[in-house]
Amino acid sequence: MDAKRWRELSSWLDQLLDMEAPARIQRLGQIAERDEGLAAELQQLLSREQESEQFMAQPVFAAPACARAGTRIGPYRLLHLLGEGGMGEVWLAERCDGMYERKVALKLLRSGLADPGLHARFARERQILARLQHPNLAQLHNAGIDLDGHPYIALDYVQGEPVTDYCARRQPLLLERLRLMLQVCSVVAHAHANLVVHRDLKPSNILVAADGSVKLLDFGIAQLLDRDDEGAGPGPGEPRAFTLHYAAPEQVRGEPVNTLTDIYSLGVVIYEVVTGHKPYRLRRQTDSEWERSILEVQPMPASRRLQVADAGAARPSLAALRMARQVRGDLDLLLDKAMAKDPQARYGSVDALAEDLRRFIDGKPLRARASTRRYRLHKYLQRHRWGVIGAGSALLMVLTVSAVALWQAQQARVEMARAQAMQDFSVGLFDRAAASGHGRFDVRQLLQMGRQRAQLELRDQPVALAELYGVIGRLRIGLGDYQAALQILDEQRALLQAQAVVPPVLQLDAVTQRARALRMLGRDRECVAHLQAMRPLADEQQGLLPAAAAAFASQLGRCQAQLGDVHGARQAFGTALSLYQRGDGDGNWRGVAESLADLAALDEEAGDAAHALVAYQQALRLMAAAAPGAPETIVLRRQLGQALARAGRPAEASAALELAWQAAVQAFGPDHPETLSVRRARALLAMRQGRAAWAGQELREVQVKLRRALGPDHRETGLAEHALGELYRSTGDVQQSLVHYRAAVRIWRQPDHVALLAQGLLDLGQAAYEAGELGAARGAWLEARQLLIAQRGIPSEAVRRLDTRMAAVTWPAEHQPRPTATN
Amino acid sequence: MDDGSDITVWLDAARGGDRAALDRVLTVLYQELHGMARRQLAGQQGRTLDATSLVHESYLKLLGSRSGARFEDRAHFFAYAASAMRSVVVDYARNRMARKRGGDLKRVDLPENSSSGIRMDEDMLALDVALEKLGALDAHLAKVVELRYFAGLTEQQIAELSQRSERSIRRDWQKARLFLLAAVRED
C-alpha cells in the first residue's frame, strides 16, 4: 500500500465509520461497482471494527503504582487497594498513631500526575465534604497532605455492596427497592440544600450495608453551585469526570450541570434498581452509542423492560412479571419524568421526586402530571441549547426590567389605548367598503382609499398615520403586493424618522414589517441590515413587548436563513420561540408553531429530516388548534409536503400539498406567489411520480406567472427555473435542462441568493456531466464545493457527498481530483 | 544528566529542524524514562509501570520547574516523550525475547502482558513493525497511537495538545487501530 492509497482508504473510512450497517453495506456496494479492490480492502479493515474496540484500548502500562501496602500516608498506614477512580486510588487504611481503631477509606491523588487542576478538585472535594453531614453520606474524617506532597482524604470505610448488586442478589420486593432509593434521595437533597451537586450518581457510589442502610460515596467531582471558580467544570483538556452510563443529556453535551442533572441520574439508577437493566439497549457498546442514546433515545418503559426475558432465559420470571404489573403506569410515569431529556421537564427538586416515590409506595396518586402541551414542546426544544441559556437570561432580564417597569407600564397603557383606536379605524374602513360594495369589495382599491383618507384625516397625527401605514403595509404583504407594501412601509419609515418619540411597539412593528417586505422581495441583506440597526431596541423590549420582539426575531432569523447564516438564524428562531412561549394567547401559539417550523426547516437543511418532519406536524397541530384556517397553515402544509417528498414519502406529501393547494387558491387566489410556490412543489412531486408531461405544463405556467409577479431576478423565479431544469433532466432533455439550470444559477449569483447557489451549481454540474460537458461540470462542482466550504465549513456532509460524487467520475487526465482529507 | 535549561534550548532547536538537537532530546528522554522505569520496578515484582505518570514526571523534571516552558514545548515534549516511551517498551520486549531464546527467564522486569492484553514479546514487536508501516503512510495517525498507547494520554489530552477536536482524534485512533489490527493479524 502506498500513502496515496491509504489516504483514499482513510477518507472512505471517515465516511463509512459514521454509517449504520445497512447504509454502510449499500455504500460499499456502490464502491465495489467502481473499484472492487478498494471495496474489498475497506471491507477487510471494517470487519475488524468490533475487535478493534478492545485492541490497545488501555495504554501499554496503565496502572498507577506508587502507593503500596504498608506505606504511611499522613497518620494512616495503607492496608490494601480498594479501587481506582478517575482521580486516584482508594485504599483501606488504619491509623498508625493509635488514635482510634476504626479503619478508613483513604483516597489518594493519582501519584505522579502532578496536575494542578486535579489538586484543585481534590481540595474542592475536601471542602465540600466538610460542609455535608448526613447519616447516608460517607463521613469525612480527616484530610491533609502527606510529606511527599500527596493530598489525601480519609472517609468512612463503608462495607457494603453497590445497590444494584444488592438487589440482584437479594431480590427484594419492589417497595423495598424504592425505600433504598428514598434514602439516596434524602442525602442528595441534603447536598442540594448545601448547593452541592453530586454529578456522578451511580450504583457503584451507592452502597448498601449489611443492615440495609445506604451510604452515598464519592463527591469526587461534585460541584459547588455557589462558587463560580474557573476550576468548577472540567477544562478542555481534562478527562470526562463522570460515568457516561448515568450521565444526563446536558452533561453529554458538556453544558453546565445543576441539581436537575442529579435528578436524571437518580432516575437512571432507580430504573436499574427496579428492572436490573440500564434504560438504553445498545446495538454496540461504544461511547458514541451511549451518547446518542442519552441524547436521543426514549428509554423503554420500566414495566416493558421487566417483561423482556433476560439473556439465556426463555421467558421473564414470574417475579419480574409481577413487578411489571406494579410498575406499569405510575412508576413508569415517575421514571419518565425523572429521566426527561429536557431538564425543565424533570422533577424540579429531589424532594419532589422523593415525594412521588413515597406516594407510589403508599399507593397514592402521583403529583407528576401527564404530558402537557407545553411539556411536549419542550421535548423538541431540548435539542436546542437556548433552553438553558434562556432560563438564565430571562431571570436576569426580569431583574433589570422590574426597575423601569413601573413607569413603562403607564406608557404601555397609553399605547394600548391608541392601538385600540387605530384598530377601530381600520375595521370601520373595511365595514364601510364592504357595505358600499354590497358585501363584495376589491381589497386593493380599499387600501388605496384608506390611504388617501388617512392622509387627510390623520394629517396632524403622524404617529397614528404611521400606524395606519403599517396596517396597510401588512395587508399588502398578505396580498402578495410586495413592491407596494415596501413603498408604503418606506413612507411609514420616513414618518417615524421625523418623530422625536416613537412608541417602541410601533417602532418594532414597523421595522419588522418592512424587513418582511424586503425579504419577500428577495432583498435579504437589506432585511438583515435594517433589523440589526434596531436590534438593541428589540432586545431591550423583550420583557415588555414579548410578542413584538418575537416577531422581530423571527423575521431576522428568516432573512439570515435565506442568506445561509444557519447559526444566526437558529439563535433568532430560538429567541422568538422562547418569547412566544411566554404568552398564552392564540397569537402566541401561532408564533410558536411558526417558530417550530422555522427551526424544522433548519434541521432539515442540516440533514435531520426525521426531527424536521415531527416538528412540522407538531407546528401544524398547534396552528390548527390556535387558529384554524389561518393562512400560515398553507405555508406549513407546503413545507411539510416538501419535507415528506424529500423523505421519500410521496403519498403523504401529495396529500399535504393538495390541501395546501386548495387552501391557497381559496385564500390567496391563483396568482399569489405563495400559491405559485405550492403549485411548483406539487408539480415537482408529480414529476417524481412519473407524471412528467403534466408537471412540465404546470412548471412552465408557474415560471411565467412568477416572472410576472416578482420579476425575472427574484429568488422564487430562480426556483421555478431550477424546477424546470429538474423536469428536463428527468425526461432526458439534458440540453434544455442546462438552459434552465443556468438561468437559475444566474439569478442566484446575486449576493442575496447565494445560499441557493451551491445547490444550483451542484445540479448544473450534474446536468453538464450528463451532457458530456466535463469541463463545465467540473467548474460548477468546484465552485459549489468552494461555496459549501465557505458556508458550512469543511467537514460538512454536503462536501463529502460532493467529493464522493466527483471521485466517482473518471476525469480526463489533466483533471485528476485528489482525495480530500476531512479534518 | 544535564541541566533542564539545555532541554528547552534543544527543544527550540529541534522545532527549528535541527536533527541533532532532536536526537539529543530523545536520548536524554530515553535515559530519563529508562531510569525511572527501573527505579519504579525495583523490588516490585508484579507491579506495573504507569506510563502516564512516567511521562508526566519526566516532563516535570525536564521542563516543568521552569516557568518559561511554553505550550509548544509541552506539545512537542509529549510527542517526543511518547516516541521515547515506545522505544523503551519495544526495547524491553526485544531484550525479553533475547533472554527467552537464551533460556534466561530469571529476571523479569516487566509484566508478562501489558494492560491492553498485548504480550510483551512477539506481539509488541509485531505492533512496532505495524506502527512503523502506519507512520510511513500517515505520520499523523502514528503520532496519535504513540500518544494514546505509549504515553497513556487520553483522547482529550491529545486533542488539547494537538489543538484539534476530540472527535477527530477519536476517529484517527479508530482508523489507526483498524490499520494496526489488520497489519498484525496479517503477519
Image (cartoon, rainbow, N blue to C red):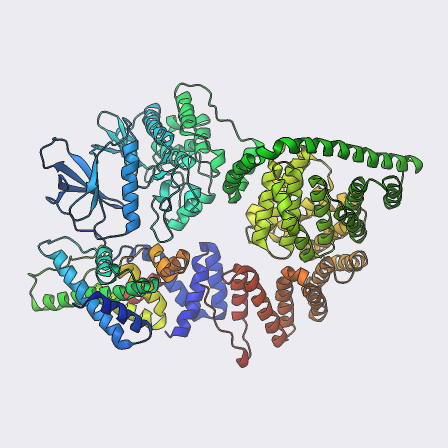
* Residue A613 rendering spot, x and y as whole percentages: 59, 46
Is A150 located above or below residue A421 in the figure? below
Identify the residue at image location x=66%, y=43%. Answer: A551
Camera-nearest residue between A412 and A763 = A412
Q: Quadrant of the N terminus of chain A?
A: bottom left
* Residue A678 rendering spot, x and y as whole percentages: 73, 50
Camera-nearest residue between A66 and A31 = A66
Q: Is residue A660 left or right of residue B23?
A: right
Identify the residue at image location x=54%, y=75%. Answer: A810
* Residue at the front extreme of this rendering: A500
Q: Is residue A657 left or right of residue A350?
A: right
Quarter of the figure with residue A501: top right
Is A375 located above or below residue B72 in the figure? above
Camera-nearest residue between A327 and A398 = A398
Identify the residue at image location x=32%, y=56%. Answer: A51
Is A479 located above or below residue A51 in the figure? above
* Residue A197 rendering spot, x and y as whole percentages: 37, 36
Q: Is residue A756 left or right of residue A83?
A: right
Camera-nearest residue between A593 and B17 = B17
* Residue A107 visible in the snapshot: no
* Residue A216 visible in the snapshot: yes
Q: Is residue A390 left or right of residue A752?
A: left
Quarter of the figure with residue B22: bottom left
* Residue A673 rendering spot, x and y as whole percentages: 76, 52
